[in-house]
Amino acid sequence: MVHVTTKIDRADPADVARVGQYTAATIHEAQGRRGSVSPAITPIDRNMSFVGSAFTVACAPRDNLMLQVAIHYAQPGDVLVVQAGALAEAGMFGDVLGNACKAKGIAALVTDAGVRDTQELRALGLPVFSGSISIRGTVKETLGALNQPIVFGGEIVRPGDIVKGDADGIVVVRREEAAEVADLSAARDAHEAELIQKYWAGGTTIDLCSLTDVLKAKGLTTDIEESA
């Protein structure tokens, strides 16, 4: 017998929305370069992006039984994070299940396995990130865990953590850190916007990034000093 957890604690929706305003790269940097998922997991369309609470799923390789169970129990705004043994050669998700997700208001599907029916999924508009595109079918045989911590793309994902994905990758934010990470991301965005303005005003990378003393300490010399 396998008991699955269907009820999870999620971050405050306002905090999820605030985190979602920022890019995955900004969030990753803002929270101390933590939370990045393997870049091998990519969107089927680079214009796709998402944010939501993680609903974690553990599937056996080439078996999507627990994914179907997860779609049944997931709530609107959840992100299905599906660990399938990193068997990227199996197309465990396609347009039929995509429509089931879209009808329920599920925010996105991310898996380390493969997906198929990508043209239909793009037209559907459901964000889908996967380890590969594969037409190879799956079975529905093996029970597994729902809403337990999983290792996904090299990162520990807990049910209810915030997951953000865009063209550059996927990042995980701990549920209890959501408000703080949103503040840190806002500060980083503001700092980068200021730097960009200064570059256009004539500032240089060495000056604005305070690299003069760093480069000198490392022994960097240029022909400018030699000709002075």
Image: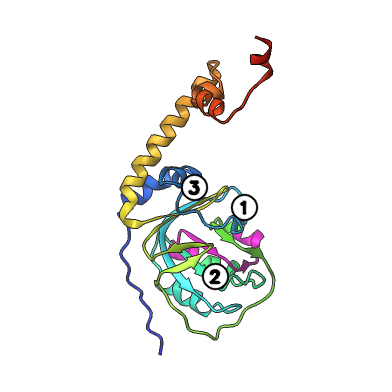
Label 3 element class:
helix
Residue 139: image quadrant is bottom right
The amino acid marked with disc number 3 is Ala
Asked if residue 104 lies in the magenta stretch, the reply is yes
> Quick check: 223 above or below 156?
above
Residue 175 shown left or right of residue 191 in the figure: left
**Which residue carries the number 1 mark?**
45
The count of marks equals 3
Q: Position of residue 167 (x, y in %)?
A: 57, 48
Q: Say whether marks 2 and 1 touch (CB < 8 Å).
A: no
Residue 67: assigned label: none
Label 1 element class:
loop
Label 2 element class:
helix
Mark 3 or mark 2: name the one nearer the start of the chain.
Answer: 3
Mark 2 or mark 1: name the one nearer the start of the chain.
Answer: 1
> Quick check: 91 above or below 187?
below
> Quick check: 22 above or below 86?
above
In the image, 109 versus 179, the foreground residue is 179
> Quick check: 83 above or below 175?
below
Q: Position of residue 169 (x, y in %)?
A: 55, 51
**Which residue carries the number 2 mark?**
97
In the image, 195 versus 53, the foreground residue is 195
Q: Find the magenta span and give its range.
A: 101-121
Foreground: disc 1 or disc 3: 3
**Which residue carries the number 3 mark?**
24
